[in-house]
Image (cartoon, rainbow, N blue to C red):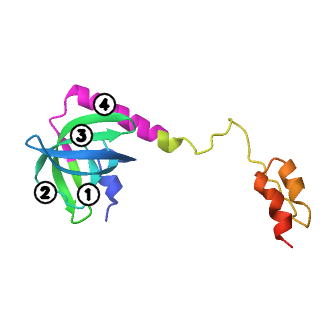
């Protein structure tokens, strides 16, 4: 059997953002976008729409707001739904590209960036009675000064 990701025309990009679902211009429900692609997105919500339902969705992802029309293409009851974007304008397509670029950049950037070519340095300390002040002096968290006292 072929992997799901291999069957997709465009890759999904993990992201998190608020979404408001409107039908006929009225608020219908809210949810959370968990991934996005050029063709659609997945929305977690307790009350997904039925397959084939048309809606207008307003997403706020990574600081970018996108209003776009979509159709429900699959549903997981009590969990969420996959939405396919329809009638996408050039402006909406450009906004989607911005969102995907930010999602990709956020995924690629490490939590603690390091200079190119730098390596992590490991330091080992032996904690003995009275050594807490030596640890604090070496630049570790100041609460470490009490470690030696707690070993008594």
Most foreground residue, 105 or 1: 105
Neighbor class of circle 3 (other Cα within 10 Å; few <14, some 14-19, many 20+) is some
Q: Do the residues labelled 1 and 4 touch (CB within 8 Å)?
A: no
Mark in the foreground, 4 or 3 = 3
Marks 4 and 3, the one that precedes in the sequence: 3
Marks 2 and 1, the one that precedes in the sequence: 1
The secondary structure type at the circle numbered 3 is strand
Q: Position of residue 99 (x, y in %)?
A: 36, 36
- Residue 38 can be seen in this image: no
Q: Does the magenta stretch include residue 134?
A: no
Q: Position of residue 80 (x, y in %)?
A: 25, 59
- Residue at the extreme left: 24
Q: Is residue 118 left or right of residue 23?
A: right
Most foreground residue, 80 or 116: 80
Mark in the foreground, 2 or 3 = 3
Q: How many marks?
A: 4
Q: Are marks 2 and 4 in contact (CB under 8 Å)?
A: no
The residue lying at 21 percent from left, 66 percent from top is 77
Identify the residue position indicated by label 1 in the image.
Answer: 45
Q: Are marks 2 and 3 in contact (CB under 8 Å)?
A: no
Q: Is residue 97 magenta?
A: yes
Mark in the foreground, 1 or 4 = 1
Identify the residue position indicated by label 2 in the image.
Answer: 51
Vertical relation: 3 (above or below) 67: below
Neighbor class of circle 1 (other Cα within 10 Å; few <14, some 14-19, many 20+) is some
Vertical relation: 129 (above or below) 56: below
Identify the residue position indicated by label 3 in the image.
Answer: 58
Residue range highlighted in magenta: 84-105
């Amino acid at each position: 059997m072929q992997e799901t990701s291999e069957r997709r025309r465009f890759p999904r990009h993990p992201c998190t953002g608020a979404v408001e679902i409107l039908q006929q211009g009225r608020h219908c429900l809210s949810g959370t976008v968990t991934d996005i692609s050029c063709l659609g997105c997945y929305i977690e919500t307790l009350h997904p729409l039925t397959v084939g339902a048309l809606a207008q969705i307003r997403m706020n992802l990574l600081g970018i707001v996108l209003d776009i029309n979509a159709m429900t293409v699959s549903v997981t009851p009590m969990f969420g739904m996959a939405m396919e974007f329809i009638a996408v304008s050039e402006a909406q397509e450009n906004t989607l590209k911005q969102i995907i670029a930010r999602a990709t950049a956020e995924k690629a950037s490490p939590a603690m960036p390091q200079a190119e070519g730098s390596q992590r340095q490991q330091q080992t300390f032996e904690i003995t009675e009275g050594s807490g002040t030596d640890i604090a002096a070496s630049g570790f968290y100041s609460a470490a000064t009490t470690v030696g006292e707690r070993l008594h």
